[in-house]
Image (tube, rainbow, N blue to C red):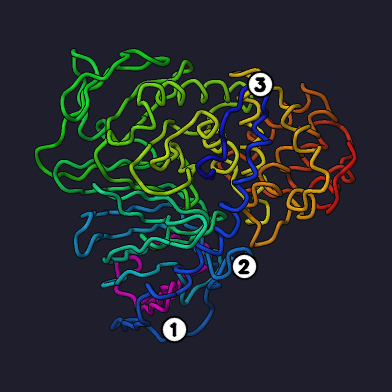
Amino acid sequence: MTTAGNSRIAPPQAPRAALRGAMALALAGSLAACQVTLDGGENAQPSRTVPAPTAPPATGPHGADSAGDDYVPGDGNGGYDVQHYKLDLDIRPGGSPELTATADITAKATQRLSRFNLDLAGLTVSEVKVDGAPARYEHEGAELIISPAQPLAKGASFSVTVRYSGTPQPVSKPPLGVYGWVRTSDGVFVACQPSGAHTWFPANDHPSDKATFEFRVKVPEGLTAIANGEPDGGLPGLQRGPGGNRRTDGSLLPGDGAGAGVQPVLLRRRQAAAPVTWRVKEPMAPYLATVTVGRFDVRTGKTAGGIPVITAVDPTVRTTDLEDFHAKNAEITHEFTKLFGPYPFSSTGGLVDNADVGFALETQTRPVYGSFGASEGIVAHELAHMWFGDSVSVTRWKDIWLNEGFATYAEWLWAEKAHGVDPQQEFDALYQQADREELWGIPTGDPGRENMFSSDAVYNRGAMTLHALRKKVGDETFFKILKTWTAEYRHSNATTEQFIEVAERVSGQQLDSFFQAWLYGRTRPPR
């Protein structure tokens, strides 16, 4: 995640590290903001119990009602492992209800279960089934407690169907502002880190339980829904046309052929609403899911290495040129494959919407950006997350530097390639701030719930840790460490301890004292 103004590429004489102080306030407390609504606040539905004729009393072994992560108390659940989410979503922006949906969830029991929980906040549940049979359920705040008609055996695969409706409520708290399910003038913008997924679908809402996804989305005539992954049968509302790219009003877009492998497309509004299915083929953490609805100019193509690119921009957003944005997505993705290893997903790209939010989020395969636009530094940051955060995901939120420190260092690497700004300049500008308590007084490897999005402790010092490691082991070994990390933990979860193990194994060096100083010390480490 980045906030507007955080990731500006500075000219060589002014390293970006000196420009990033404003980010600290905007990012600090975002976790607390997610908790305000999601833990059963003013938008939560009242508790409700619905018995099923064949369901036994909710007694016996049950799954934990939390993932046990102190950074996000109450989020996630235990006792099962989700394999796949199939979400059938009828989204009517501004309607009442705004969302009518069915979630079909496939999971595997990791213990014997007489009941288990899903996270779901602020929406009304009308029916729950387990393996096709009606199930008893209770909806208490953000917890949907389900008792199947028959207990589930350890190791059993099972399905859960939840029918629900309502108007998802955005999360709102200064200074970050509004995020989650955010209404725009022509649709909705969906992005919430760390745990806003369960404001719009029932989930095991913690990154430690990743799954594949399928979104079947129906929207009103004239609107387009863009989600993670790729759509069946081509992008909705798009046809190839010999006349080049066109906007929704029929006017030609400039620069046909910009970017590697770009193919011209013609955007046409559908004459009737029809469901479109988007599929995510690789595992994804729930908070990375998005279904953003509105009117968009869209470009499709491929990177120089053949990776499909889908890029969209709301035509009312004047801060981002579609052609430039599309080309940057292709170029940066291709460059990062050289540094970090093979691209881990089936497509790349990005979406800029007319949402009045001050952040961007690395929603898997297709990062989303608010109306402030997408400068190339922010684009580099969010695309780096495809490797660091989306493919290799945190097991627990205390290790968020594995996401944000790595993505920030990727910005430094991109600035070097694009503008000649040596990462050493970025490092030096920060290191000279010897008395900066926000940078040195908070441990990067365990910053605490209130500081998990600290731009200084997590983003900047995380990037500095990587640069210091690079200087210690040498360039060849450093980039071998990164590629080994992304390969060995591809599509899974990992911890700081596991990264340290990889770094020591690849480098052949004992690095305990190095990482202790850089990640857990509360004073500036020696150079």
Tell me the mark number nearer the camera, choosing from 3 and 2.
3
Q: Which residue is mark 2?
A: 68
Going 35% across and 35% down the picture, which residue do you hit? Answer: 230
Q: Nearer the viewer, residue 79 or 216?
A: 216
Give the position of the C terminus as an image quadrant. Answer: top right
- Give amino acid for label 3: Pro
Q: CA distance from mark 3 to mark 2?
A: 45 Å
- Give amino acid for label 1: Ala
Going 30% across and 13% down the picture, which residue do you hit? Answer: 256
Q: Which residue is mark 3?
A: 12
Residue 181 to residue 390: above or below: below
Residue 195 lies, in percent from the top left, at 49, 59
Q: Is residue 144 magenta?
A: yes
| Comes first in the chain, label 3 or label 2 | 3
Query: Answer yes or no: do the residues labelled 3 and 2 have beta carbons within 8 Å?
Result: no
| Comes first in the chain, label 1 or label 3 | 3
Q: Which residue is mark 1?
A: 58
Give the position of the N terminus as an image quadrant. Answer: top right
Q: Is residue 257 left or right of residue 178?
A: left
Q: How many numbered discs? A: 3
Tell me the mark number nearer the camera, choosing from 1 and 2.
2
User: Could you say which quadrant of the image residue 442 lies in?
Assistant: bottom right
Q: Is residue 373 left or right of residue 338?
A: left
Which region shows up in magenta? 130-159
Q: Nearer the viewer, residue 375 or 155?
A: 375
Residue 440 lies, in percent from the top left, at 79, 50
User: Could you say which quadrant of the image residue 130 lies in?
Assistant: bottom left
As helix, strand or loop, the secondary structure at mark 3 comes to: loop
- Give amino acid for label 2: Gly
Residue found farthest to the left: 271
Q: CA distance from mark 1 to mark 3?
A: 64 Å
